[in-house]
Image (tube, helix red, strand yellow):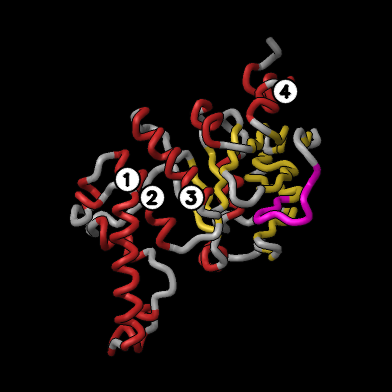
Amino acid sequence: MQAQELRGPRAPAYPLLVENVRLSFAGLKALDGASFHVTPGIVTGLIGPNGAGKTTMFNVISGLYRADAGSISFMGQGIERMSPHQISRLGLVRTFQIARGFPKLTVFEHLMVYGARQPGEKLLTAVFGSTEARQREAELSEKALAVAARLRLSHVIDNKVTDLSGGQKKLLEIGRALMAEPRMILFDEPAAGVNPTLAEEIGDQLLSLAEEGLTVLLIEHDMALIERICRRVIVMAQGRTLAEGSFEDVRSNAEVQDAYLGGRR
């Protein structure tokens, strides 16, 4: 089934462009010609029933999986053959549905690990130190404190990650992504499993990031959150792109209703 564009003509260029991406596991088609684009500077939702291929698509975009066919470009550069760290260095980063972390590190240390452009990662610099490394470490330290404050994690900045609540771990996932100095972030269910108040706060954070010029694409099953923060929605089903447009556009689309409900009502 071909993707149905429901809103407006295509612009000449997009931060992320996915074209005819296919991926199979042992003969099972996880992605079957999915194509879509992401508009800059807004929050875009990627939705669909369980098994639609959403997280698999994120894994392909971020370099964890390599597609069998198709192309993916970020800021006009092909990334479908790049490794995850190469893609991250271009400014395309992601979070995970299950918050990850280093159990023995504190929140502050965890944020510092993900800081971009660390000269101390070089062997000689790590052993002997340098003015450049110390200056960059000071900059990252200041940024980590600012990110923690933004996400209301300052009061747990010295706590180990294992001591955080589930909601705080979700916020820390956002912080991890911000420390990488992204141009675009892929969020995999950032509000899953958190209470409604925190879900609303996370939604506000994503809107704020978009207002600051960051491009955001998120997978989310909370349709109230999708409706509130997403100016554009992409619907996937059976590994394909089913529809694209505003939330109202896709909600009223008969094919989307079939995919979610098993039939029109």
Which numbered disc, 3 or 4, marks the residue that appears first in the sequence? 3
Type of amino acid at the residue the image marks with label 4: Asn
Residue 242 place in picture, x, y as percent: 72, 33
Picture residue at 34% right of the left edge, 30% below the top: 197
Secondary-structure class at tag 2? helix
Q: Write the start and end of the magenta stretch as one range.
A: 9-18
Type of amino acid at the residue the image marks with label 3: Leu
Could you tell me if the residues under marks 2 and 3 are in contact, i.e. CB atoms within 8 Å? no
Q: Which mark is residue 113?
A: none
User: From the image, which quarter does the C terminus lie in?
Assistant: top right
Distance of label 2 from label 1 (alpha carbons) = 6 Å
Of marks 2 and 3, the one in the foreground: 3
| Residue assigned mark 4 | 253
| Residue assigned mark 2 | 173
| Residue assigned mark 1 | 169
| Residue assigned mark 3 | 209
Picture residue at 34% right of the left edge, 56% below the top: 147
Labels in figure, total: 4
Residue 12 place in picture, x, y as percent: 78, 55
Residue 159 showing in the rendered view: yes
Secondary-structure class at tag 1? helix
Could you tell me if the residues under marks 2 and 1 are in contact, i.e. CB atoms within 8 Å? yes
Which numbered disc, 4 or 1, marks the residue that appears first in the sequence? 1
